[in-house]
């Protein structure tokens, strides 16, 4: 599952191999948009979150959205591919390299001067992996989010707010800033929005060139909450949970003891979706059971 930094690394590898080179082959079954011409050269390779774009010198932009399973591979010409050919969504060949996009749900091309009309690129927020990204703009996009009742956890992964973040850094930034993941984004103060963005960007950039992800060096494994469900929180000792909300596809790892900022349910009861959420870890299930019993008793 590529996080934003995996896409950033893929773009860096493609850039090194392809920029300045003329293409000798281009294939993309089912491509929507103009086909890059043989002989045109690759001018730039850019990543924005999980979106990777290859820009040709004739102004054609190949836009790929990697989502959860998409991946770009780079091979020497003649080298055996690691994935089956029918999974290839785009193939670009130069005289030395073959770049292949596998399993990418979106592959399309457009001419660069139409970029503002492009459904994705026209509206995406700054890429926090980039040192040039405007953090205040990301914070403003979060603070002024058009649906104030959406949870802050969801809004943080909306590419219109920022790109390059991914689930690991989303969870870790929420924990670092002590923000409740289900806080309504409209309830999160502006200063906290900026804290979240700066923290996430700090984590993404610190790990860009590292094979392992570390956001909390004092915690074994290097992450404060991600993947630590059922274990003790290093800050408050409470038990870390994992929760999947019905309308999101990914798990949010969080600590109920110390992530209370902008908490959406001050009067907790048994109808609380957090208490009802499934948690597969036995220790955490026990913990949630105890909490419910204690609430009933009081
Ligand atoms: Zn905690």
Image (cartoon, rainbow, N blue to C red):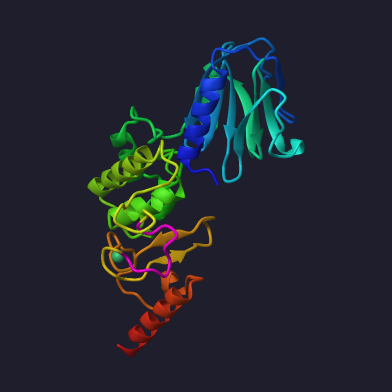
Q: Is residue 217 left or right of residue 157?
A: left
Instruction: Determine the residue positioned at 35% across, 57% down.
Output: 224
Q: Where is residue 99 in the image (x, y as percent from the top left)?
A: 64, 27
Q: Is residue 296 above or below residue 184?
A: below
Quadrant of picture, ligand 1: bottom left
Q: Position of residue 10 (x, y in %)?
A: 53, 32
Instruction: Determine the residue positioned at 69% across, 19% down.
Output: 35
Provide the major secondary structure of the magenta segment.
loop
Q: In this view, does 190 lie above or below 19?
A: below
In front here: 271 or 109?
109
Residue 236 seen in this snapshot: yes
Q: Position of residue 118 (x, y in %)?
A: 55, 27
In front here: 266 or 180?
180
Q: In this view, does 273 lie to the left or right of 34?
A: left
Q: Residue 259 lies in what quarter of the image?
A: bottom left
Q: Residue 105 lies in what quarter of the image?
A: top right
Instruction: Determine the residue positioned at 66% across, 17% down.
Output: 36
Q: Give the range drawn in magenta.
A: 224-233
Residue 144 seen in this snapshot: no
Whether residue 39 appears in magenta in the rendering, the answer is: no
Q: Where is residue 3 in the image (x, y as percent from the top left)?
A: 49, 43
């Amino acid at each position: 599952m590529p996080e934003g930094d995996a896409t950033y690394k893929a773009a860096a590898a493609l850039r090194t191999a392809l920029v300045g080179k003329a293409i000798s082959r281009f294939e993309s079954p089912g491509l929507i948009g103009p086909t890059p011409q043989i002989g045109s050269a690759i001018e730039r390779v850019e990543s924005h979150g999980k979106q990777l774009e290859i820009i040709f010198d004739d102004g054609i932009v190949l836009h790929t959205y990697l989502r959860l399973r998409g991946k770009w591979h780079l091979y020497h010409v003649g080298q055996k591919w690691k994935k089956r050919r029918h999974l290839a969504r785009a193939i670009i060949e130069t005289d030395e390299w073959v770049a292949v996009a596998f399993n990418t749900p979106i592959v399309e091309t457009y001419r660069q001067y139409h970029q503002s009309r492009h459904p994705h690129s026209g509206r995406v927020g700054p890429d926090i992996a980039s040192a040039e990204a405007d953090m205040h703009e990301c914070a403003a996009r979060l603070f002024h989010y058009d649906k104030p009742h959406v949870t802050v956890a969801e809004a943080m992964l909306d590419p219109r707010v920022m790109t390059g973040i991914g689930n690991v850094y989303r969870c870790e930034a929420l924990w670092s800033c002590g923000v409740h993941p289900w806080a309504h984004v409209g309830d999160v103060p502006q200063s906290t929005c900026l804290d979240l963005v700066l923290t996430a960007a700090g984590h993404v950039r610190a790990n860009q060139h590292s094979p392992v992800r570390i956001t909390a060096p004092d915690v074994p494994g290097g992450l404060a909450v991600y993947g630590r469900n059922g274990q003790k929180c290093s800050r408050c000792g409470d038990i870390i949970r994992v929760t999947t909300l019905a309308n999101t596809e990914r798990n949010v790892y969080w600590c109920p003891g110390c992530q209370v900022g902008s908490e959406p349910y001050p009067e907790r009861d048994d109808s609380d979706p957090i208490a009802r959420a499934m948690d597969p870890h036995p220790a955490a299930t026990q913990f949630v059971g105890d909490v419910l019993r204690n609430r009933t008793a009081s």
